[in-house]
Amino acid sequence: MRILGKGQIDRNRPVSFRFDGKSYQGYQGDTVASALLANDVRLMGRSFKYHRPRGVLTAGSEEPNALLEVVGATNQTPNVRATMQEIFDGLNTQSQNRFPSLSFDFMGVNDLLSQFLSAGFYYKTFMWPRAFWEKLYEPVIRRAAGLGRLSGKHDEGHYEKAYAFCDLLVIGSGPAGLAAALTAARAGADVILAEEDRELGGRLLADEPDLDGAPARDWVSSTEAELRSLPNVRVMTRTTVTGAYDNGTFGALERVGLHTPARADLPRECFWRIAAKRAVLAAGALERPIAFPMNDRPGIMLAGAVRSYLNRWGVTAGKRVTIFANNDGARQTARQLMAAGVEVAAILDSRTDATAIEDCPVYLGARVTDTSGRLGLRSISGAHVGGNFQIETDCLAMSGGWNPTVNLTCHLNGRPRWNVDIAAFVPSEGVVPGLSVAGSANGDFTTHACLAAGQAAAIEALAEIGVTAAAVPLPRAEGVPYAIQPLWLVEGKGRAWLDFANDVTSKDVKLSAQEGFTSVEHMKRYTTQGMAPDQGKSSNVAALAVLADATGRGIPETGTTTYRPPFTPVSIAAMGAGGRAMGFAPQRFTTSDQASRDRHAPMIEAGLWYRPSYFPKPGEKTWRESCDREVNMVRSAVGVSDVSTLGKIDIQGKDAARFLDLVYTNTFSNLPIGRVRYGLMLREDGLVLDDGTTARLDENHFLMTTTTAAAGLVMRHLDFIHQTHCADWDLRLISVTESWAQFAVAGPKARALLNAVLDAPLGDFPFMACGETQVGGVKGRLFRISFSGEEGYEVAVPSRYGESLFRDLVAKAEAMGGGPYGMEALNVLRIEKGFITHAEIHGRTTAFDIGMEKMVSPKKDCIGKAMAARPGMVGEEREQLVGLRLAQETKAFGGAHLFTQGAEVERETSQGYVTSVCWSPMFGATLAMGFLKNGRARHGEKIRIVDHLRDLDLLAEVCDPVFHDPKGEKLRA
Amino acid sequence: MRLTCPLCGPRDRREFYYYGHEDYLQRPGPDAGPEAWDDHLHLRDNIAGEVRDLWYHETGCAQWLVVTRNTVTHEILSTELVADRKKKGVRA
Amino acid sequence: MPELIAKTALLGKKPVTFAGTTLAEGDAGPVASIALFPGQDKAAAKALKPLAFPAPNSFTESEAARLVWTGRDQAFLIGAEPPALGGIAAVTDQSGGWATLTLTGPMAVEALMRLVPLDLRATFAVGQAARAPLGHMQSILFRTAPDSFTLMVFRSMARTAWHEIEVALRSLAARAALA
C-alpha cells in the first residue's frame, strides 16, 4: 500500500510493468519489490527446496526470497532480485521455481515431505542403484529444487568491460562513504565513489535521520552535487564492488542498462577492474533475521527493510504491522510507521530490561512462537513473561541485530573477529593491504560515528600515499548507542528458517552437528547454508550461532565460513564482456585474404590466422577434388601459396651467429652469406621446440623462420635465452612477421613464373640460396626453399605490396597451367615429401624420434643438448617417425594407434600412433606419418592401425617417411 | 594482481607470462651431469614466503623480469630486468 | 613487368565518429625499428640528430618524424627513412607491418580505457607512449594531442582492432544518450 506524502518516487511519472503476466503500475524510482508491495502483492517467489511461498525479506542486494526472471526480447535473466530491479515501461518479469503458478505450485508437496528432505538428504538417499543417477535422480532433483531458468538461446545482449584507476576508491555512499569521499575530494585526490544503489545515501535514505537538524536527504543531495561537480571525482551508482584482489585491484559490476528498455549499443552491464592506491570500505551493515517457528511467510520482513520501503518508496508492507526485535534500532520502525499513520499492533522485544514506553503495546521478554497464513502472514502467536498471546497482523518486522558487511575484507583470506558488544563479526585490521574499513561496516552503528570514521579513514589513507587531506565540516548527527541482546533462535514446534535462500532450518544445522559435521565449513557443505547467490548474507551468523550452541562452543571458537568473491552474483556475460563472436580472439588476415576470398576459397583457422583451405574450380564438388587438382598442379606445373603466416625473426649483431649456434642444435656460424639452412630448435629439456629455415642476409644479419603455430613461443624463447644468458652480447632480435608478405612458388615451372614477375631474370640461384630481389621496382627477398618437394622459391615483399603481388603471381601462374594452392594441398605435398609439422613435433618428440639426432652438433653446446642425451631420450624403446602406406582410400585416421599384427589390441600393447594422414593423388595411395616403437628398423612390416573413434581397423606398410623424391633431385633441379 | 615493470611501470598481471623460479637463470654447464640438469629444470621448493621468479612482459616491452614476492601475503617486494643483471654469457 | 600497388591494412575504411570521437586509419609512412647495440647510446644520439632517443614510455619528434620508444634500447622511427646506423643499431624495416589507427575526440580516453588496462587520463600526457595490450592484441600507443591518440597494431589484426574500438565508441555514445 502506498502512503501519501512519503517516499522519493516520482509520482508524476507512472510506470507500468508485468509480473507473472499481469500488468502493475508503479512510479519512476520504484523497484519491482517496492512496486509489488505498493500493489499489495506479498507473494513473490517459491523457496529453493520446499517450494514454500515467499515474499520479500529485504530491500537490497542481499534479498534471498524475491528472485525473478526478467524476460527481454533476446534474453531471459534468472535470479534477479526484485529488490534490485528498477521498473520501467515494458519491463516483463515472472516468478521462478514454481509450476503451474506462484500461488498454486505442485512442487509444494516437497513441503509436506520436509521430514524426509533434511540436511544431507541427497547424500543419504540417492546412493543406489548407480544407473538411477543420471536417468532419474539428477533430472528429478534438477526440476524440483532450483532457481530460475535461462532462455536456452544465445544472449544477444551487449556487455562491456572497462578499466579504472584512482587514488582512493570509496565503497558505499552511506554517511561513512560520503564523508570519506567528500574529504578526499576536497583534498584534490583522484576519487571513485562506488554505490550499489541507484542513489547515493545508503541508510541515510532508508532511516531518514536528521543531519544538522534537517532531513539527511538534504545533506546527501548537496554532498552529491559537490562531488559530481569536481573533476577529480567519479561517482559510480548502480555499481557493486564485487571483489577485492591483490595489489589494490577491485572488481565492480555496473548495471548500465538494466533499468531501461534495451537499446542498441547500450551495455546491459559493465565489469570494471579498478586499480586503487587506497580504498575505504564503507559498505554498511546488513540486518539479520531471527529464527523462530514458521518465520518465512510472505509479510515477515526485516525491520530495516520496512523502514526502507516506507521512507524511500512510500510503501507500507502491511496495514497492521508487528515488530519483533532484540535491539533498540527496531523501535524506530514502529515510530516511523505510526508517524505515517500505519497501525502498529505491538512490539515484541526479546529483552526483559528494555523500555516499554511506546505509543503501541510493548511485550518485553517476548518471542514469536508461531505464525499462520498460507500465502501471506495473517497472525502470529507470541509468548512473554505474562503468558501466550495471539496477534492478527499482516506484516512482521523483525530485527536480530546487524552484521557489518565484512565480505570484501575476507576476499584475501582475512578472518573477521567477533565483537561481543554488537554480537557480530567485525573486520580484522589490515587483512586487505591498502583497504581500511569505516562506519557500520566496521561496527560503528551511529550516524555520528559513521561520519567521523569515514572522514578519518580518508585522511589516513591519503596520508599513506602522500596526499594531505583536511577535515571537512561534518553535519551534526545522532549518536545513540546501539543496544542489543543476542537472540538467534526461538525454539518451538515448527521449522525455524536460518537460510531462506537455501531452505536451511535450525534443525538442519543441529542435525549436521549431531552427525559429526561440527566444523562450520563442514556444516555449510552438509546443509548448503550460505551457498548460492546470496552467500549467506542474512544467514551466516545466526547459523553458526546455532551450530556453536549445538556443539557447546562459543561463536568466536566456531568461526565463520569464508566469504569469497563476488559479493553479489556477477553474470558470466559481464565478466567475459567483449569476448563473444569477433571479440573472442583477434582475427589475423594475410595480405592475400581478399584475393583468396574472391576465388571462393573457404578459409580455415590456423591459430589466429585465416588461411585458404583450397581454391575450388567450377565443377568441383568436394574439397578432395580441388585438393587433388592443386597437388597435381604443383607437381606438374606451378603453384602459389601465401606463407606469410610463418614467423619471421630478424637477428642482427656481431654475436648473431654465435646466438644461433646456441639456440639451434646445428651450426649456423659457418653458413655462408646468401645461403639458407634448416635448423632444429630444442627446449632446454631436450624435446623439440620448433624447426625452420634461417637465412644469412649479411655477415651479422640473419632472418629466422618459425612455424606459424610456434611464432610467439619461439620469440618468447629467444628473448629468454638472450636476456638471461647473453644480454651483453652484440645482438638484437625483432619480429618482422608482419612486415613481409611471402609467397611460396613451387613446381617445375616455378623458375619460369618467377622470371615473369621479377624485374631481372633469375641467374644461378641454387637450392638453399637467398638474396635480394626486385619486383616492379620494389625491393624484396628471394629464398630457394621448398616445403613441397618440388623446385621451390619463396618471394617476399613489404606487406603493403602483398595483395598486389599475390594477384599477379596467381594470374601469371594460371596462364602457365598453374594457380594458387591452399592448406589442404600444402599438407598433402609435405606428407608426400615427409616434412614434419607440429603434428609431429608436438612437444613429446626428440631429435632422435624424428630421425634428426645427427643435427645435434657434437662440437658445440646448445639449448637442450645436455638433456637430449639423458637416458630414455634415445634408443629402440622410443617411438620413431615412420611413413605408413595403404593402397585403399579411407577416412583420415590421425590419432589412431598402431599394433603389431596378431597382438592384443589394448592400451598396453600400443606400438605407436598416427600423426598425419592424406590421400596422395600422386601415389594413388593413402599416406600417413606416425611414430612407431623402434620404427626405423621396421620398414617393410605390415602394421595394424586401430581407430576406435572412427571405427577403423586397417593394415598398412611401414616405410620411410619420405615418399616423394627421396634423393631430393627435384628440389635441386 | 599488479606487477611493476621496471620499464613500463605498474601493469595488470594479465600482461605477463609466468615462467617459474629464478633457478632457470643458473644454467648448468654442458657436462654438469643429469642430476644437475634435472635439478635445474624440474626440482623446486614450494616456498611459503619470499620467492624470486621469472615473468615475461609479453604484451608490453617483451622483457623478462625477476619478481621478488611473498607467496603468503602476495606482496610484491621488487621487480628487476633479467637483462640488467649483467650476467656474463653462457659457454657457447 | 608488374606494377605493385601499395595498400594500407584497412584501405578503403572510412573514418567513423561516435559521441564526437573519430576513429580513422592513418598511414605512418616509413617505420623502422632502431635497436641500439650495447654501449652505442652516444653514437646513436649523434647519428639520430635532431631527434633524441626517447626515454621509456615516451616519444620525441621533429617536423618530419617521430621516434617512439618501443622497448629496452629500442624505438620506432616513424615518418622518415632511417639514417645510416651500421654497427650502432640494428635497423629493421617495419613499414606496413603495423596498422596505424588514430582516435580523436572527447571520448578517446574513455574508449581506450575499455580496451587498454592503463590509466590514459591526464597523467598519460601528450608525448607519452606505451607498449600495452589492446584487448587481446599487442599495441604501441602514444598521445599526440590532449584529445588524440595514435595506435599501432599488427597489420593482420587491424580489422579486429578497428572493430573493438568501434564497439567501445558505440557503447559510450549509447551511454551518453541515456544520460
Image (cartoon, coloured by chain):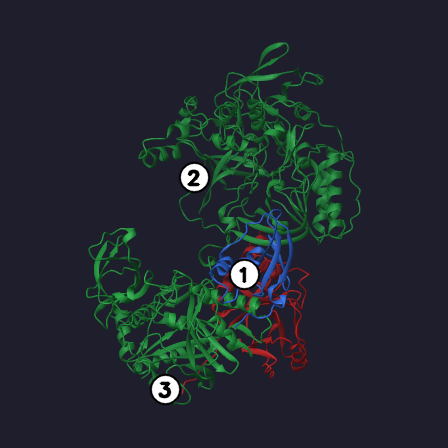
Chain colours: A green, B blue, C red
Question: What x and y, as percent, mark residue A369?
Answer: 56, 16
Q: Are marks 3 and 1 in contact (CB under 8 Å)?
A: no
Do the residues at discs 3 and 1 belong to one chain? no
Do the residues at discs 3 and 2 belong to one chain? yes
- In the image, residue A783 above or below residue C179: below
Q: Is residue C29 visible?
A: no
Q: Is residue A417 left or right of residue A862?
A: right
Closer to viewer: mark 3 or mark 1: 1
Alpha carbons under labels 3 and 2: distance apart:
65 Å
Alpha carbons under labels 1 and 2: distance apart:
50 Å
Q: Quadrant of residue A260?
A: top right
Task: Tell me which numbered mark, 3 or 2, is placed earlier along the sequence.
Answer: 2
Q: Pointer 1: what residue? A: B24
Q: Nearer the viewer, residue B73 or A466?
A: B73
Q: Is residue A36 left or right of residue A885?
A: right
Alpha carbons under labels 3 and 1: distance apart:
52 Å
Q: Are marks 3 and 2 in contact (CB under 8 Å)?
A: no
- Mark on residue A756? 3
- In the image, residue A456 above or below residue A496: below
Question: What x and y, as percent, mark residue A813?
Answer: 33, 80
Q: Is residue A779 visible?
A: yes
Q: Pointer 2: what residue? A: A149
Question: What x and y, as percent, mark residue C3?
Answer: 43, 84
Instruction: Count neighbours of disc 1 (C-alpha within 10 A) and say few if under 14, some if 14 to 19, many if 20 or more.
Output: some
Closer to viewer: mark 1 or mark 2: 1
Q: Amino acid at mark 2?
A: Arg
Q: Tag 3's secondary structure?
A: helix
Residue pictured at 68% horizontal, 64% vertical: C125
Q: Amino acid at mark 1?
A: Tyr
